[in-house]
Image: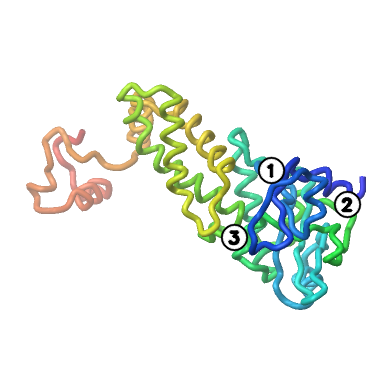
Amino acid sequence: MDTPTIFQARLPRRPYCANDLTCGLVVRPTATALQFRHLQPNAPLEVAWLIFDLDFRGAAYAWEKANLPPPTLTVINPANAHAHLFYGLVTPVAMSDAARDAPIRYAAAVQQAFLAKLRADPGYAGLIAKTPCHEAWRTLWVQRLYELGELAEYVELPKRRAPREALGLGRNCMLFDALRAWSYQWIREYKRNGAMPEHWQRAVLGQAEKLNTFTLPLSFSEVKAVSRSVARWTWRQFSDEKFSAIQSARGKRGGRPATRTAEGEPWAAQGISRATYYRRLKSGLLVPDTVA
């Protein structure tokens, strides 16, 4: 199967599209959308293309200067030589509620590293791109798709994720992390008050919508997928009983010192802080009569 055929086969059934982006987007069947200058290349819950927007002359060959592999598609604006570079993935990254988090984070890291090396526009969300087969653009096709691991070999992946909300995949990760932290805090409270799983899922979805405050917000389908993933996992994994077991296990491993001993708070009587008390105890400089 050649690249143009692959591109069309992977399009959403009814993608967003537009001739003039300043006039807004419309939804049309695939065959109709292909007649517009711009369209949505990736399905709502699947990333088959990593797309980069390069707003400078000679953008079509920026990958050579950056020592990166050739894009699967390069769509050039002949009026200014700016371009969209598409890297097609052999295995698209699933973004549904059933999707694993690790591949999404891995893809986001690769996307971030390529963006930096290509000097691409960090404000480009990747929802809409130039339609490769439209006569308004000049398109270079390469008969090549890439595995994420293959693309990662060309870059040094960041040790920490940059808080760059404009990155499409990065926004999913940021929402997931923020929503997960909120859910860890509130799940046991909901269960104590007799909430059912459906009540918890609605609460998590509502919080996810509140957290979707990016300059370019995620679509509702993406927000819903993230919220369902977090809601289902936390409902299965969190309870007062499991929390107590985790805390007990941490204590046995030598986790955070107890806030009180059997004798109360001996550090107060000695005029030192709790941290100093336990630090001296650990070093052998202090041996109290009893420690809980």
Label 2 with label 3: CB-CB less than 8 Å: no
Q: Which of the two marks, 2 or 3, is nearer to us in this view?
A: 2
Q: Amino acid at mark 2?
A: Pro
Q: Picture coordinates of residue 58 (x, y %)?
A: 79, 76
Q: Is residue 22 left or right of residue 149?
A: left
Q: Picture coordinates of residue 203 (x, y %)?
A: 41, 34
Choose the circle earlier in sequence order: 2 or 1: 2
Mark 2 vs mark 1, CA separation in Å: 19 Å
Question: Picture quarter containing residue 120?
Answer: bottom right
Q: Which of the two marks, 1 or 3, is nearer to us in this view?
A: 1
Q: Picture coordinates of residue 79 (x, y %)?
A: 80, 76
Q: Amino acid at mark 1?
A: Glu
Location of mark 3 (residue): 158
Location of mark 1 (residue): 46
Q: Amino acid at mark 3?
A: Pro
Q: Picture coordinates of residue 127 (x, y %)?
A: 66, 54
Check the image and report above or below for 190 versus 159: above
Location of mark 2 (residue): 4
Query: Which residue does the image show at 81% across and 60% down from the upper left?
Result: 71
Residue 112 makes an appearance in the image: no
Query: Which residue does the image show at 9% across and 53% down from the upper left?
Result: 271
Quarter that holds the C terminus:
top left
Choose the circle earlier in sequence order: 1 or 3: 1
